[in-house]
Amino acid sequence: MISSEIKKEYDEKGFLIVHNAIDSDLAAEVKNHVLWLGEKYPDIRPEAFHHHLLIHDPFIHHLLKSDRLLKIVEKIIGPNIALFGAHYIAKRPYDGKPVGWHQDGSYWPLEPMNVVSLWVAGTSSTVKNGCMRVIPGTQNKRLLKPSEMMQVDTEEYVLDLAIHPDQIDDSDAVDIEMEAGDVSVHNPFIIHGSNANLSDQWRMGLTLRYIPTTTYVNREHWECILLRGNAVDKIKNHYTGKPVYIDGEHMPFQGYEHYR
Ligand SMILES: O=C(O)CCC(=O)C(=O)O
């Protein structure tokens, strides 16, 4: 996709796919990272490799520096970019959990709600293995509050809240099918979710949430990463520094020596 089209498509549809946004070596490292985290944290399901496990991880910092990813983000939120959330939603073969219909912004303490998500595919993501699905047009709806959503069992679902089926029409939902290395982009209002993975293949996605540095994260002690441009003095976000790579503690990757 020509980069000038990114903003246009995003503004019109609230989501888009950028094919081959990262090269195949880096995509393979995303996949290895999920498997590596699985060995490091055997008691945590791979749908739940959350922000706190990733924010000081040298491989994540390395990936976030990818110029191609930052170019996509810059088209949408401008040149002063920070990461406020990272989370692998990786679904194992046969028992990967579904994600109920939701709008991301319902969960987030962002002021204002100026944020964009990238979903980086570490494996192919298909209807069969539980790819993300979006409901077109819903980017123009208001954000539901958590109190307007239903509580769902996290033994069965990745997230604890979901929009009640009576409140949505998912008949024209679009499946975001991608290959490893592709990236989808979505806005915080669009309603999306995914089905369970009952296939014999992994489905691995890394969700990355980017804010302009004018967006305040109103959650105590929450750590962000400043990626490009400048912080804004009066916006009191906490930006964490570059992590130090430690043998055994972190996954080796191409370029890890820059984090020694
Ligand atoms: O990975 C999925 O299936 C859902 C992703 C999602 O909800 C998100 O990126 O906000």
Image (cartoon, rainbow, N blue to C red):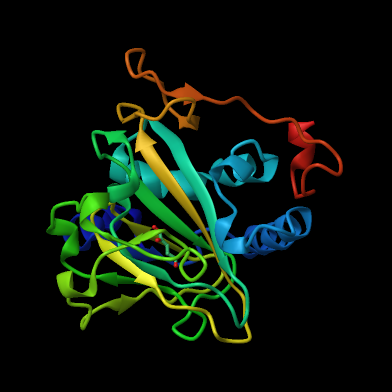
The residue most toward the right is 247
The residue most toward the top is 233
Point out residue 31 in the picture as x, y percentages from the top left corner. 66, 64
Quarter of the image with the C terminus in it: top right
In this picture, residue 115 sits left or right of residue 121: left
Q: Please tell me which residue is depicted at 72% across the width and 61% down the height of the picture.
A: 32
Point out residue 9 in the picture as x, y percentages from the top left corner. 23, 60
Q: Nearer the viewer, residue 260 or 87?
A: 87
Q: Please tell me which residue is depicted at 17% across the width and 74% down the height of the picture.
A: 166
Q: Is residue 72 above or below residue 193?
A: above
What is the quadrant of residue 58 in the picture?
top right
In this picture, residue 233 sits left or right of residue 103: right
Q: Please tell me which residue is depicted at 35% across the width and 29% down the height of the picture.
A: 218
Q: Nearer the viewer, residue 153 or 23?
A: 153
Point out residue 95 in the picture as x, y percentages from the top left corner. 59, 78
Q: Is residue 131 above or below residue 231?
A: below
Q: Nearer the viewer, residue 7 or 214?
A: 214
Point out residue 48 in the picture as x, y percentages from the top left corner. 57, 57
In this picture, residue 158 sits left or right of residue 39: left
Quarter of the image with the N terminus in it: bottom left
**Callout count:** 0
The residue most toward the left is 141
Q: Nearer the viewer, residue 228 or 145?
A: 145
Picture quadrant of ligand 1: bottom left
In this picture, residue 126 sits left or right of residue 253: left
